[in-house]
């Protein structure tokens, strides 16, 4: 038996060819000249059967699919079954492209089938041909379709109409549901259907503990079917007798709702589930005009577009969440009885779909996630670069191919850092400055603008920390002044100095090294935390003003790091801390991802706990205040080690809540 297949290199098409080969047939697959390699690559999986696959070079956009008289003469009268699968399914495609591929492509396929005198024409349509029919759409329904305003729905309906009205040979129509990956291997060719929500599930897994119940939506029923079921069902139904002139729905007869589907994949991805699912139809009580007007408000649309963009979800996909149509598939399943072709439950193969997506289709896999890709060839200014976190970060950034502008008070130390950057093959420039002196900041900005034309990335890392209780601070107001001078005003002055050039070039990144203390409010750090919180608050306000100008602000809530800055506080020798290299890793992540913030789970927990039960958190912090004494330096008795002895309870407390400045 001879088969002609369009779309044979597509996802359903290549699985269908495998099924047809299993029946001992010979397959003539239409391919573009540039797609022959793809067919040959797939043919290697078919073993000896691949010898029965013959590529036919043609084009969906040309008359009779581009087959010349010789090709038509060679195949004419020999084709028993003509399968037309080639179509465009792209949630971002415009109406013109969809019409050319789906409607005109079907017209050309029919011309070719007629010219070949094929025995039967099999048109693979879609449940989209029903549009947004409000109710159950039977397999014998077609003209009843409603809501065909979506260009994909419309073109699938029009292409099926062409078959029904103009096909001069026996024909059959198949309407697959939402096709997902292979139920045995998980294989999928692109992000589509429920896969668009996998990134949301993945983000939730990384952010929220898996045991935490979430609130979601119930949504409508999603007729998901794995590609292997569709291919086997197609091949079987095509060879059944007495089915001409009919349509068959290849869908799940007992589909799950959108909320249930998300929970199945959440379990597969070890993410928290949506325990409470709201029926989105409840918004139906709101008048349509009011709903539409609200959705079109610029702020609402802007927020929605930003959220969808962050998750990689095309707006058109949301229409499926509340799709009003259910699909009757009794005819199709009646004809499949006794064939051994069964639709597996989603729960039995969801883990395979998730695993394939995470290993092959996750958009983040194809991003350049290297530090070199983020900063290579760019000008990166790092303050506090002479030691500690700043020095470690500068070395990493320089080795990644950036031009590093090194800023600190100690010029001789900066020269040593520059030497190490250059020995690693990088470029570095020394710019000594005391950032606590705003006149020095002005001079620094002017020098950098003159010598380098500005910066692409500003890393505000330099800072001063003071650990002293309020009882010892009442006559030391200057502690608050000097921490604010460096940690807030110095950083702010740098931002203002380089911001105009960033705006002019339409791109820039500001990274502010804050502290986990801003999230956890530790005692004895009121001066330090207040100065970091001021910069944090400024950044949150400024970010919205700079978003449209391509300038990102990232705040890194740094845990306790073993640096020279904490050396005077001897009790920290018993504390679990990050190394400067680990701290540099956090800064590298900030430069690569350009997120709103980088925070530890402990820091986020501290914020949430304080928002929910501030008095309880105060009680915990009061315990810490009693356990950890002021340092000898804070008491004005440097070298008096008796003042810094820690109890076993204090050491245990520090290890239970690691990374916080106590």
Image (cartoon, grey):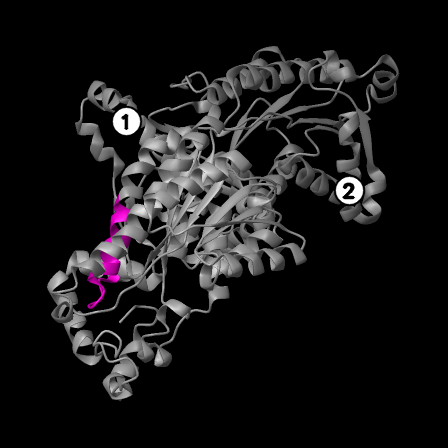
Which residue in the structure is indicated by mark 1?
A: 299
Q: Is residue 654 above or below residue 462?
A: below
The CA distance from mark 1 to mark 2 is 48 Å
The numbered disc on residue 3 is: none
- The majority secondary structure of the magenta stretch comes to helix
Q: Is residue 209 above or below residue 361?
A: below
In the image, residue 535 lies in the stretch drawn in magenta: yes
Q: Is residue 101 left or right of residue 45?
A: left
Q: Is residue 45 left or right of residue 393?
A: right
Towards the viewer: 250 or 184: 184
SS at circle 2? helix
Q: Is residue 275 visible?
A: no
The mark lying in front, picked from 1 and 2, is 1
Q: Which residues are magenta?
A: 520-537
Q: Is the residue marked by circle 1 packed among few (<14), some (14-19), or many (20+) residues within 10 Å? A: few
Towards the viewer: 575 or 233: 575
């Amino acid at each position: 038996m001879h088969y002609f297949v369009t779309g044979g290199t597509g996802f359903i098409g290549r699985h269908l060819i495998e099924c047809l080969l299993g029946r001992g047939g010979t397959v003539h697959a239409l391919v573009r000249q540039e797609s022959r390699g793809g067919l040959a690559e797939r043919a290697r999986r078919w073993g000896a059967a691949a010898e029965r696959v013959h590529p036919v070079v043609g084009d969906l956009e040309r008359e009779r699919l581009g087959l010349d008289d010789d090709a038509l003469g060679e195949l004419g009268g020999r084709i028993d079954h003509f399968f037309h699968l080639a179509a465009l399914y792209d949630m971002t495609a415009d109406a013109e492209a969809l019409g050319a591929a789906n409607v005109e492509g079907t017209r050309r396929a029919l011309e070719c089938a007629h010219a070949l005198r094929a025995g039967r024409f099999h048109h693979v349509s879609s449940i989209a041909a029903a549009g947004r029919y409000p109710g159950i759409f039977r397999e014998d329904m077609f003209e009843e379709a409603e809501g065909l305003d979506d260009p994909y729905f419309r073109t699938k309906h029009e292409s099926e109409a062409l078959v029904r009205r103009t096909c001069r040979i026996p024909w059959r129509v198949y309407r697959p549901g939402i096709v997902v990956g292979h139920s045995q291997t998980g294989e999928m060719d692109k992000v589509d259907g429920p896969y668009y929500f996998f990134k949301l599930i993945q983000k939730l897994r990384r952010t929220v503990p898996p045991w935490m119940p979430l609130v979601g939506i119930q949504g409508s029923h999603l007729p998901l079917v794995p590609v292997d079921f569709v291919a086997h069902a197609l091949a079987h139904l095509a060879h059944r007798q007495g089915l001409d002139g009919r349509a068959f729905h290849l869908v799940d007869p007992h589909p799950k709702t959108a909320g249930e589907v998300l929970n199945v994949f959440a379990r597969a991805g070890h993410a928290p589930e949506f325990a409470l699912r709201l029926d989105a139809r409840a918004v139906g009580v709101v008048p349509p005009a009011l709903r539409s007007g609200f959705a079109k408000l610029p702020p609402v649309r802007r927020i929605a577009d930003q959220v969808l963009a962050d998750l990689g979800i095309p707006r058109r996909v949301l229409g499926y969440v509340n799709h009003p149509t259910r699909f009757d598939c009794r005819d199709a399943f009646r004809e499949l009885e006794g064939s051994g072709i069964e639709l597996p439950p989603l729960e039995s193969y969801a883990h395979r779909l998730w695993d394939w997506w995470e290993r092959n289709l996750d958009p983040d896999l194809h991003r350049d996630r290297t530090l070199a890709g983020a900063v290579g060839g760019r000008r990166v200014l790092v303050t506090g670069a002479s030691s500690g976190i700043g020095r470690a970060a500068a070395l990493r950034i320089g080795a990644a191919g950036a031009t590093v502008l090194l800023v600190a008070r100690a010029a001789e130390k900066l020269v040593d850092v520059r030497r190490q950057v250059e020995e690693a093959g990088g470029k570095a420039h020394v710019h000594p400055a005391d950032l606590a002196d705003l006149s020095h900041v002005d001079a620094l900005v002017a020098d950098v603008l003159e010598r380098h034309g500005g910066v692409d990335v500003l890393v505000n890392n330099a800072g001063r920390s003071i650990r002293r209780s309020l009882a010892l601070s009442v006559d030391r107001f200057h502690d608050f002044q000097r921490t604010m001078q460096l940690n807030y005003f110095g950083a702010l002055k740098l931002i203002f100095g380089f911001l105009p050039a960033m705006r002019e070039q339409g791109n820039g990144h500001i990274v502010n090294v804050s502290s986990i203390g801003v999230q956890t409010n530790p005692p004895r750090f009121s001066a330090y935390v207040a100065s970091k919180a001021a910069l944090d608050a400024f950044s949150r306000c400024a970010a919205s003003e700079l978003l449209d100008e391509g300038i990102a602000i990232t705040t890194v809530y740094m845990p306790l790091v073993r640096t020279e800055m904490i050396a005077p506080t001897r009790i920290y020798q018993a504390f679990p801390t990050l190394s400067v290299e680990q701290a540099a890793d956090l800064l590298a992540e900030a430069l690569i991802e350009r997120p709103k913030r980088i925070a530890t789970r402990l820091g986020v927990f501290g914020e949430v706990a304080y928002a929910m039960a501030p008095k309880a958190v105060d009680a915990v912090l009061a315990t810490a205040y009693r356990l950890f004494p002021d340092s000898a330096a804070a008491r004005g008795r440097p070298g008096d080690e008796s003042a810094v002895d820690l109890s076993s309870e204090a050491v245990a407390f520090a290890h239970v809540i690691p990374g916080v400045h106590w």
